[in-house]
Image: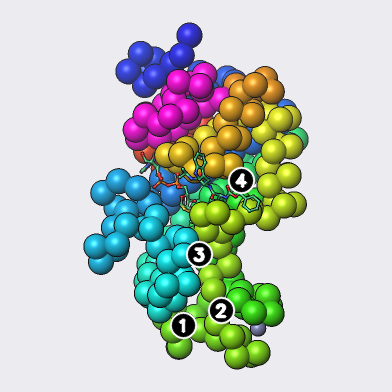
Amino acid sequence: MKATQGAAPDIAANTRDRLAAASAVAVLTGAGISAESGIPTFRGAGGLWKNFRAVDLATPEAFAADPQLVWSWYDWRRGLIASAEPNDGHRALAEMQNRFPRFTLATQNVDGLHSRAGSVDALKLHGDIWTLRCTACGHERQDLRTPLPELPPRCSCGALERPGVVWFGEALPTDVWEQAQQAAREADVFLVIGTSAVVYPAAGLVELAKTSGATVVEINVEATPVSHVVDVSWRAPAAQALPRLLA
Ligand code: BJW
Ligand code: ZN
């Protein structure tokens, strides 16, 4: 039977028991895990910037039409992220990597907060906001400056650079995606945390884990399209719920 917070007050203990019996654990995170660090999510109330919907700016078409506008949004986000700190949810996941023989963290987030919390080798499904990639020669570089001195930034070859992230209609990095699928297939427990689970192919990992035999636990403040697929649906803020799994 599916557990929810209302129906099962001891949902944390239940999930801890499932984790205690697991040797392979995989995790998929989304923007909700960084919400308590003050980073806006994409959809819902936080997903607006100067009257633009965040998801409308995260496209190759938006960049082609107005690179200055799209870069202004990314530069603003880079500033927010730089002044944010990882929260107890990020830290709990970093601690978990030491507790299981096999542990894989796949994130849709580009903010780098998992790494700053101590997670090693997080799979960045949608890239990295600190990477800049040349639109002509493909050269990539890390640039941590915020604000960037010139918008839009340019490569040494003279062409425009773009954020090193994955926009709608673009393929996920192949090696990263393959590792994420393998982890979902092999997981005994799969945690899906703070994602609206509407963006594919990342959201497909939930069903892949479930059909491959994992116990799937969702941690989210709201129901999502995968809430009916998961074994345990825990309606709670990630930064409060995740530390309870370590108790
Ligand atoms: C809390 C909380 C708290 C709040 N605690 N929870 C029709 C059907 C199916 C698929 C498609 C379709 N039409 C098009 C597609 C494909 C498309 C897609 O999925 N579209 C759907 C939206 C319809 N996908 C793609 O285009 C992908 N590529 C692809 O398919 O390529 C095919 C291909 C193959 C080969 C060659 C070429 C192409 C790429 C998708 C890339 C998504 N990119 C973005 C931007 C990244 C860069 C950036 O950050 O700027 O990724 S869009 C945006 O959405 C971002 C996120 O990673 C992603 C997911 O969002 P997320 O993380 O779930 O955030 P929210 O805001 O949606 O949800 C937050 C959640 O947190 C909520 O549930 C809250 O309740 C919760 N929450 N506070 C716990 N404290
Ligand atoms: Zn270049």
Residue at numbered disc 3: 60
x then y, percent, for residue 140: 66, 75
Is the residue at mark 2 in contact range of ligand 2, meaning its CB lies under 8 Å from it? yes
Q: Is residue 104 above or below residue 6?
A: below
Name the image quarter holding residue 71.
bottom left
Can residue 192 be seen here? yes
Name the image quarter holding residue 117.
bottom right
Residue at numbered disc 2: 161
Circle nearer the viewer, 4 or 2:
2
If you read the primary sequence from the N terminus, does the residue marked by circle 1 or circle 3 appear first? 3
Label 3 CA crowd tier, 10 Å (few <14, some 14–19, many 20+):
some
Is the residue at mark 4 in contact range of ligand 1, meaning its CB lies under 8 Å from it? no
Residue at numbered disc 1: 152
Circle nearer the viewer, 3 or 2:
3
Can residue 236 be seen here? no
Segment tinted magenta in the rendering: 216-235
If you read the primary sequence from the N terminus, does the residue marked by circle 1 or circle 2 appear first? 1
Identify the residue shown where x is 29% and y is 58%: 48
Amino acid bearing label 3: Pro
Amino acid bearing label 4: Ala
Tell me whether the residue at label 4 lies in contact with that at label 2, contact meaning CB atoms closer than 8 angstroms: no
Tag on residue 106? Answer: 4
Amino acid bearing label 1: Pro
Circle nearer the viewer, 4 or 1:
1
Badge 3 marks a residue whose secondary structure is helix
Identify the residue shown where x is 44% and y is 25%: 227
